[in-house]
Structures are given as C-alpha cells and as structure tokens.
Image: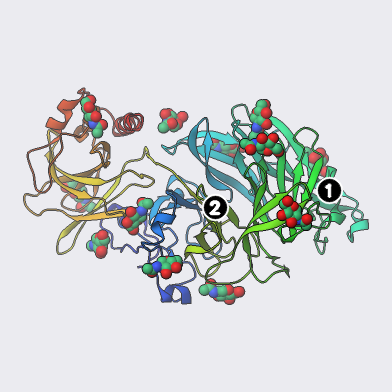
Amino acid sequence: MLSPRQTAATLAGFLSAQVVSAQTDASYSSGALGEGPYSTFVSTYATPPLWNHVLPINDTIKPQLTSGLIFIGPRGTATHQAAPYIYNQTGELVWDGSLDGYTQTMAYSVQQYQNKPVLAIWQGQFNAGGYGSGYNLLLNETYQVVGNVTTNNLPGIGADIHEFKITTNDTALLTAYNATQMDLSSYDGTADGYILTGMYQEIDIATGASLFTWNSLDHVDPNECYVSPGSSGTEALPWDYFHINSVDKDNKGNYLVSSRHCHTAYYIDGTSGQIMWKLGGKNSSFTGEGSEFYFQHDARFHANDTQVSIFDNGATSWETSEATARGLLIDLNYSNMTATLAVEAIPYYNLTVAESQGNVQIQDNGNMMIGWGQNPWLGEHNAEGTPLWAAQFGVGDVQAYRAHRSVWNGYPTTLPAFVIQSNSSTTGYASWNGATEVATWELLGSNDASAVVSLANTSAVGTFETNFTIPSSPSYSYYQVRALDSGKLSLGYSNFVSGSNGTVVQPAATQTPAVGAANATTVTSTTSSTSTGFSSASTSGAETSKSVPMLVTMSAVVIACFYAS
Ligand SMILES: *[C@@H]1O[C@H](CO)[C@@H](O)[C@H](O)[C@H]1NC(C)=O
Ligand SMILES: *[C@@H]1O[C@H](CO)[C@@H](O)[C@H](O)[C@H]1NC(C)=O
Ligand SMILES: *[C@@H]1O[C@H](CO)[C@@H](O)[C@H](O)[C@H]1NC(C)=O
Ligand SMILES: *[C@@H]1O[C@H](CO)[C@@H](O)[C@H](O)[C@H]1NC(C)=O
Ligand SMILES: *[C@@H]1O[C@H](CO)[C@@H](O)[C@H](O)[C@H]1NC(C)=O
Ligand SMILES: *[C@@H]1O[C@H](CO)[C@@H](O)[C@H](O)[C@H]1NC(C)=O
Ligand SMILES: *[C@@H]1O[C@H](CO)[C@@H](O)[C@H](O)[C@H]1NC(C)=O
Ligand SMILES: *[C@@H]1O[C@H](CO)[C@@H](O)[C@H](O)[C@H]1NC(C)=O
Ligand SMILES: *[C@@H]1O[C@H](CO)[C@@H](O)[C@H](O)[C@H]1NC(C)=O
Ligand SMILES: *[C@@H]1O[C@H](CO)[C@@H](O)[C@H](O)[C@H]1NC(C)=O
Ligand SMILES: *[C@@H]1O[C@H](CO)[C@@H](O)[C@H](O)[C@H]1NC(C)=O
Ligand SMILES: *[C@@H]1O[C@H](CO)[C@@H](O)[C@H](O)[C@H]1NC(C)=O
C-alpha cells in the first residue's frame, strides 16, 4: 500500500500499513501506482522508493552475480524521501538513511578506510548550476561517523556533490567548483562575466590537509569544450564550461578526471598537474570508437590502466548526441594511441539517453553495475554487456547519481524497532534499520522486572520487516524482541511494548537484560517455551547492574558482537 507517511503519534500506537515488497508489475511501469511509488512499514517510518524488477533475477542468473548490497541515493521531485538507501539485490530495504538523519545525497558509496569498510555520504548545499558545497561523512559498520572530509584552503568552497573517492593511501579525492570573475568576451560571453572552474583536491583524511589541488582553468581553455555560456556567465549563474564529475588516481600517482562539458577524460600528472593525454573530445590523444562519448560521467581506470570504464550519457538536457546512454569499458592502446570498445552495455528496457548523472561499476567478476542517472533505472550486465537483471525505482522524476553494489555488514547501535498491532489476532512487527545479520527474531514476554520469558523464535524472512503472531495465551504485560544472527549470537534488544495497547514502555531499564546475555547460545526455544528466560541466559556471562541505561547496554552488546564476528 502506498500510503502517506505516518505521523509520529500513530507510530507510537497501533499502525495500519502494509508492506509492499519488490515486484514486477505492469501497473508500476505504467505509472498507475504514481511517479514515485514507495513502501511503508508498521514498525518504522522508513519510506524507501519501491522497485519494479523489469528483468527479474532468476535461478540461472543468480550464480552469475557477485555478493553485495545495492547503494543508491534516490532524489528528484517524485521521490517521497530523498536519502541514501541500502537495498538487497531483490529490492528489499536494508537501510533508510533518512531515519538516521541523512538527506539528499549525490556521491554515496562504500569505500575502504584504514582497511575497514566505510559508508561515504555527501551532504550539503546544492547550487543552481548543478554543483554543490558540503562535506563527506564516513560511517563505519556501526553507522557511527568516523570521518568528515571537505575541501582545504578553498575559502567558502566546500566539497562538491560529484566525487568522493578514497585512495589506497587513505587520502580522499573530491571535486570543488569555484565561481571566478573572468572576461568572457572571446567566448560569446560578457567582459564582466563569471566562469565556474572545475577543481579537485586530494585530502589527507586524518588531518584534513590538502595534498594536491588542481584547477581546470590553469590547464584547459574553454575553447576545448562544447558548452557556450548561453544565458549563463553571470554572477548568479556562472558559466560551467568544464563540469568536473569524477576523479580517479592510479598507482603511478596520476589522476584521471572526467569533464562532462569537454567530452574528455584527462590524464593528469600527479606532481605537476600537467595534462599527459586526453581521451575523447576535440583534442583526443586517442582515436577509435572508445574515444567517442558525450556528456559522460564516472571515468575509472582498470587492468593496470590499460582500460577505462565510462558512463556515456549521450546527452544533456539541451542536446542529444546519441540514441542511448551506454556503459562502456574501453581498451587503451598506448603504442598506437587507439581506444577500442571492450564492452558496451545499453539499458535493457528503454533505449534512451541519460540527460544527467549515471555510473558504471565494474565488479570483481567483470559484471557491470550501472545506474542510469536521471532515469530511475539500475541493473547489472555481464562482462560482455548483456543485461542480467534490471529494475526501476520510480517512473517520474526519480533519479540517483550513481548505483553501486558493494559488500556491507551493518551493526547499527540503534535499537531494533518493535510494534504490536491487535486486530482479530495480535501481530508483532520487528525491523532494524541497517542491520544486515539478523537471522532470527526472538519474542520475549514479561509481566514484571524480574522475569522475561522467551516465547518464540521467528526466522527473519529476508524482508526488511518481519511479522509474527503474538500467542494469545499466556499473555504478558510487556513484549520485546531480540535479534539473533545465524550463529544464535544476540545482536540487540528492542524496547518493551505494552501487550494491551502496543505503546512503547520507556524506559525499559529495569527489564533490560544484562550485558552478559549477549551470547545467546543457551536460547533454544522455538514456540511458546517458557523454560528459557534472561535469568538463564545471563548466567553465561558477567552479571551487571540491571539499572544500566538501555542505550549504554545496547551499544556495549553490539560492539562486543562486532569484534566477535
Ligand atoms: C565505529 O566508530 C565508533 C566511533 O568512533 C567507535 O566507537 C566504534 O568502535 C567503531 N566501530 C567499528 C566497528 O569500527
Ligand atoms: C562535518 O563538517 C561540516 C563542515 O565541513 C560540518 O558542517 C558538519 O556539521 C560536520 N558533520 C559532522 C557529523 O561532523
Ligand atoms: C575562487 O574565485 C575567487 C573569485 O574570483 C577568487 O578570488 C579565488 O581565488 C578563487 N579560489 C580559488 C581556490 O581559485
Ligand atoms: C600512495 O603513496 C605512495 C608513496 O607516497 C605513492 O607512490 C603512490 O602513488 C600513492 N598511491 C596513490 C593511489 O595515491
Ligand atoms: C602496470 O603497467 C606498468 C606500465 O605502465 C608496468 O610497469 C607494470 O609492471 C604493470 N603492473 C602489472 C602488475 O602488470
Ligand atoms: C593498435 O594496436 C593494437 C594492438 O597492437 C591493434 O590491435 C590495433 O589494430 C592497432 N590499431 C591501429 C589503428 O593501428
Ligand atoms: C522510456 O523513455 C521515454 C523517453 O525516451 C519515456 O517517455 C518513457 O516513459 C520511458 N518508459 C519507461 C517505462 O520508463
Ligand atoms: C533468466 O534471465 C536471463 C536474463 O534475463 C534470461 O536470458 C533467461 O532466459 C532467464 N531464464 C529463465 C529460465 O527464465
Ligand atoms: C533479499 O531479500 C530476499 C527477500 O525478498 C531474500 O530472499 C534474499 O535472501 C535477500 N538477499 C540478500 C542478499 O539479502
Ligand atoms: C506478514 O508478512 C508476510 C510476508 O512475510 C505478508 O505476506 C503478510 O501480509 C504479513 N502480514 C501482516 C498482517 O502484515
Ligand atoms: C558463546 O560463548 C562461548 C563461551 O564464551 C563461546 O565459545 C561461543 O563461541 C559463543 N557463541 C557465539 C555464537 O558467539
Ligand atoms: C498503554 O498501556 C500502558 C501499560 O499498560 C499504559 O501505561 C498506557 O497508559 C497505555 N496507553 C494508552 C494510550 O492507552
């Protein structure tokens, strides 16, 4: 059901909402469900854009896919809640970043920092000209901020929306745009005009210091590019002649920079900043089909710099250059400076251009994960470019800057959400935003502080929210759930909820199990067992004061579990 967002007041009590899971649905494609269909849940406010699997994942395809979850940041006017989201490959929600306070993002991906996975999320201000000024937060696997990276020594200019990439040296590559006054009369502009320079920096993440700064205007004359000032070139709307949108760095210490408005990927000396070669555009150093792309995004090196992947948009909002956008893998031959197409991937279900945004991520097995930018489509192609699966996550103005598939294990420090609804029977709904390891939910009942009884174990069915019937007899005053992983290790407990009206009973401190209960191997109950409660579980570890505040207890449990796994 595509119901409006619930209010806080109703969430606290009984909710009526229905889970909508991934589906292949002609009514979705036709727009009958609205331009930005989304799912709702009983236990949480999460409202993720709903997917429609236009080319579903079947059993033949499954073994051809790498493991990992899907990372997109849906945005656009038809998006119910723009935010960073994590889904699994079948479109099941894993994490709704808006519940943790994150809003519209652009650069958003899993990266490695200090040999650990981090979620990098750009946040900040969007500017009218299609760039931004903000910062990139790094979240570790417990979704806690462990880094905050922006520009250095660029007064008034924060990190732009387009790029954030952590190198193997724990430095970050990020883009920046600067509006600079310039005489544009030789470029069809005015003498007192304004131009946007495309800049990037390499930042030492730990100290925030800039190690390298590059400014397009020092190296690329606007005549080399394809976009004239038109009505821009003013202070309010500076001329975006270059439009930097990706930066990569190779092991030799040089950079690969994508300029959308010059149709060129520039290879830049990591010491001098000089351009060493150009792929594409008016002055391409390479010839061949692999040097023909238009308004592209996301240029990345592969195979020891002998290949470059590029998302070829084929268009911008005012100009169409090709029949369709393409995901490209390009072979570079440096002896005769030819660029040939190794792989060309075109969108499965709608041959059209992508007026903005988009990316290509080459998986370890050669598969290409492609986000079709301004079109609300994503999907995976094999190493030959053949589509394996494809989904849409909207019909109207829903977009995502990039789409990635990456391995991610999430251990949130928030509590699992638990809500009880009573109709003809009493149903409990459990979810845990960002938790990836929950295999089983254990239902616990209590009448007072001293006895918590394990009532039932329900396997987490692979959907974001799991529901289960609360046994009517014996009934308890309060109910709680515990999340267990596949090894029966306790991951965390929800608050207690009133059995009579579903209200969250807070604080539940006196009923909070001791830290020592983290190891739940003693819990073996299946249904309606009253034999195993916290009193026995807690004997397996150190007993601590039961008045320990809930949050402190929970994070201690989660962290202990993390290091144990
Ligand atoms: C995540 O970061 C927090 C805050 O720095 C830290 O306390 C916690 O130990 C980290 N967790 C992991 C799994 O790295
Ligand atoms: C990150 O840094 C920016 C400044 O660049 C600041 O405005 C923001 O509050 C910081 N956020 C966090 C979570 O540290
Ligand atoms: C940005 O542009 C302003 C205005 O022209 C100029 O004063 C400033 O030096 C520029 N900043 C950089 C880092 O180039
Ligand atoms: C990492 O640092 C080493 C030593 O300074 C340097 O040779 C190498 O090019 C750097 N690699 C990247 C990707 O920055
Ligand atoms: C990568 O290419 C460089 C030449 O550009 C070569 O010297 C080096 O041996 C290559 N490395 C590998 C692992 O093939
Ligand atoms: C360039 O060299 C490659 C590999 O040696 C060869 O396959 C290709 O045909 C050459 N292209 C041209 C235009 O000479
Ligand atoms: C396919 O693209 C065209 C624009 O090229 C658009 O009008 C149409 O709605 C798209 N169809 C779907 C199913 O997205
Ligand atoms: C599975 O999906 C692939 C890719 O869409 C398709 O080629 C194949 O026919 C499908 N197989 C079955 C059994 O449906
Ligand atoms: C994704 O969710 C489906 C249920 O919709 C589940 O069957 C599947 O195991 C999940 N996959 C992953 C990778 O979590
Ligand atoms: C419970 O979850 C199942 C999917 O696992 C769903 O089919 C069913 O409609 C849900 N029931 C309620 C009452 O939400
Ligand atoms: C539970 O604790 C015991 C004893 O410390 C340990 O051997 C076992 O591996 C733990 N179980 C899990 C699932 O962590
Ligand atoms: C719900 O039940 C609890 C505990 O029985 C009680 O304290 C609370 O006032 C009730 N709330 C409502 C809205 O009835």
Front residue (pair 330, 173) = 330
Q: Is residue 232 above or below residue 271?
A: below
Q: Is residue 92 above or below residue 217?
A: below
Q: Going by the image, does 1 lie left or right of 527?
A: right
Quarter of the image with the C terminus is top left
Q: Amino acid at mark 1?
A: Val
User: In whole angstroms, how far apart are the C-alphas of marks 2 and 1?
Assistant: 32 Å
Front residue (pair 106, 477) = 106
Secondary structure at numbered mark 2: loop
Secondary structure at numbered mark 1: loop
Q: Quadrant of residue 274?
A: top right
Q: Which residue is mark 1?
A: 220
Q: Residues within 10 Å of mark 1 (few under 14, many from 20)?
A: some
- Give the quarter the ligand 3 occupies: top right
**Earlier residue among tags 2 and 1:** 2
Q: Position of residue 338 (x, y in %)?
A: 76, 54
> Is the Cβ of the residue at disc 2 closer than 8 Å to that at disc 1?
no
Q: Amino acid at mark 2?
A: Gln
Q: Is residue 171 above or below residue 354?
A: above
Disc 1 under 8 Å from ligand 3? The reply is no
Q: Going by the image, does 448 lie left or right of 286?
A: left
Q: Which mark is residue 104?
A: 2
The residue lying at 43 percent from left, 58 percent from top is: 48
Front residue (pair 288, 156) = 288
Quarter of the image with the N terminus is bottom left
Q: Going by the image, does 303 lie left or right of 365?
A: right
